[in-house]
Image (spheres, rainbow, N blue to C red):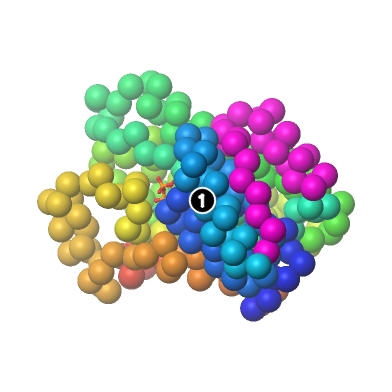
């Protein structure tokens, strides 16, 4: 796989899965843009690490749930890098709670970032991809968007929405040579899952045939395939990367 000369935007690329994806794509030669909302220092360190791999990297403060901020980021990327070849919609949050206790703002925050954020970034990046007749988009869903999970109605709804969005946009943009796929991770060791109690982790482990949790690099490897030209004939698909947790 070779991504030399490609320009990739990885949302939420300063930490966790997004950071592993950004580093993987950089190791294959792509110039990288990462965005973040809260921690500029972490993003700066990530930017320097990625640049040390011999590519250009820029970190941008941008909340994916705000359309104007996303539009500005895309315009700036094209001004500086000339194009957008690859978009990895990875930024996401959880605000877990049982339905009866879930506050309206917890539902809205999760859907705004996890689903509307994907709309905001895809719409604004696709405009540039269409002009160049080339694009690869990968959306980060989750296996719980397929099977559901008690205590995550907001998160599961957002991730199921991402799958529908992936399939609809894949159909719309296939004729423009833009491939759009989703990855559905299972349980991956990041800050997001570090907050879970040991009992929850032990219970989850029982449902994973591979009997281990995934690493961010496991997701990054599949994303690399999906943004490379090895997957030119793959679009509108959801690939589970979950140690066999969910088999369809
Ligand atoms: P993480 O470690 O919590 O990192 C989340 C990233 O998203 C951070 O870089 C964060 O930036 C960014 N982000 C959050 N809100 C944002 C916003 N409004 N605008 C822009 N960036 C924002 O999460 P992760 O575990 O790596 O998860 C990455 C993706 O994989 C998410 O979509 C998640 O739902 C999905 N996923 C994860 C798992 C898992 O087991 N970990 C399983 C299935 C799916 P800041 O540093 O600025 O906050």
x and y, in percent, of residue 132 in the image: 85, 57
Q: The C terminus is located in which quarter?
A: bottom left
Q: The N terminus is located in which quarter?
A: bottom right
Against 94, is 104 above or below? above
Quarter of image, res 70: top right
Ligand 1 within 8 Å, label 1 CB: no
Q: Which residues are magenta?
A: 55-80
Residue that sits furthest to the left in the current view: 199
Residue that sits furthest to the right in the current view: 131
- The residue that disc 1 covers is 45
| 72 in magenta | yes
Secondary structure of the residue carrying numbered label 1? helix
The residue that appears at 87% across and 52% down in the rendered structure is 131
x and y, in percent, of residue 19 in the image: 50, 56
Q: Residues within 10 Å of mark 1 (few under 14, many from 20)?
A: few
Q: Nearer the viewer, residue 214 or 152?
A: 214
The residue that appears at 58% across and 60% down in the rendered structure is 50
The answer to whether residue 153 shows anywhere in this view is no
The answer to whether residue 247 shows anywhere in this view is yes
Left or right: 159, with 8 as reference point: left
């Amino acid at each position: 796989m070779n991504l030399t000369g490609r320009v990739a935007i990885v949302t939420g690329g300063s930490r966790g899965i997004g950071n592993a994806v950004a580093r993987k794509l950089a190791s294959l030669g792509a110039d990288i843009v990462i965005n973040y909302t809260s921690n500029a220092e972490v993003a700066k360190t990530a930017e320097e690490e990625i640049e040390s791999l011999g590519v250009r990297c820029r970190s941008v403060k941008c909340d994916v749930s705000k359309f104007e901020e996303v539009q500005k980021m895309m315009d700036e990327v094209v001004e500086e890098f000339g194009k957008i070849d690859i978009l990895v919609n990875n930024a996401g949050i959880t605000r877990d709670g049982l339905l009866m206790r879930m506050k309206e703002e917890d539902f809205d925050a999760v859907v705004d970032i996890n689903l509307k954020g994907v709309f905001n970034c895809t719409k604004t990046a696709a405009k540039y991809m269409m002009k160049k007749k080339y694009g690869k988009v990968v959306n980060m869903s989750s296996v719980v968007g397929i099977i559901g999970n008690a205590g995550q109605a907001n998160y599961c709804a957002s991730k199921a929405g991402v799958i529908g969005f992936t399939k609809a946009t894949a159909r719309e943009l296939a004729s423009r040579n833009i491939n759009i796929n989703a990855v559905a991770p299972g349980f991956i060791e990041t800050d997001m899952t570090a907050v879970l109690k040991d009992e929850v982790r032990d219970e989850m482990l029982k449902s994973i045939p591979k009997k281990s949790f995934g690493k961010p690099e496991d997701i990054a490897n599949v994303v690399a395939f999906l943004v490379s030209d090895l997957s030119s004939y793959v679009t509108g698909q959801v690939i589970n990367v979950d140690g066999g947790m969910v088999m369809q």
